Image (tube, rainbow, N blue to C red):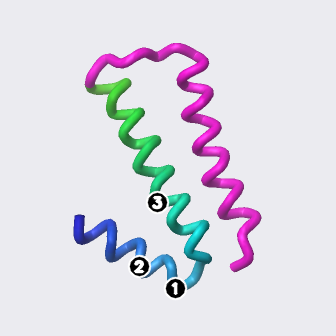
């Protein structure tokens, strides 16, 4: 837990807090969902995968359109 928090703190020196936290939370959500599908056999329903892709698109959009 210390390493992710240290990396988040480091990144907040160059990006806005809202963007940094959203990216941090989004990566955690997408990572957890992906591990659930790959390791735990959770549903690979196309709508579910599309929702995960929307989270990734939101993360990318926040970074692209944030005021650096």
Give the extent of the magenta segment.
40-68
Confirm whether the magenta stretch covers residue 32: no
The residues bearing labels 2 and 3 have C-alpha atoms spaced at a distance of: 11 Å
Callout 2 touching callout 3 (CB < 8 Å): no
67 to 32, vertically: above or below: below
What residue would you read off at disc 2?
9
Q: Residue at x 50, y 50 (%)?
A: 26
At which x and y percent is residue 15? 59, 77
Q: Specify the quadrant that holds the N terminus.
A: bottom left
Q: Is residue 10 left or right of residue 16?
A: left
The residues bearing labels 2 and 1 have C-alpha atoms spaced at a distance of: 7 Å
Q: Residue furthest front?
A: 18
What residue would you read off at disc 1?
13
Q: Secondary structure at mark 1?
A: loop
- Magenta region, main secondary structure: helix
Q: Earlier in the sequence, mark 1 or mark 3?
A: 1
């Amino acid at each position: 837990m210390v390493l992710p928090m240290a990396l988040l703190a480091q990144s907040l020196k160059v990006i806005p807090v809202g963007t940094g936290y959203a990216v941090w939370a989004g990566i955690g959500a997408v990572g957890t969902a992906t591990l659930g599908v790959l390791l735990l056999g959770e549903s690979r329903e196309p709508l579910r995968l599309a929702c995960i892709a929307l989270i990734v698109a939101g993360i990318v959009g926040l970074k692209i359109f944030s005021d650096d």
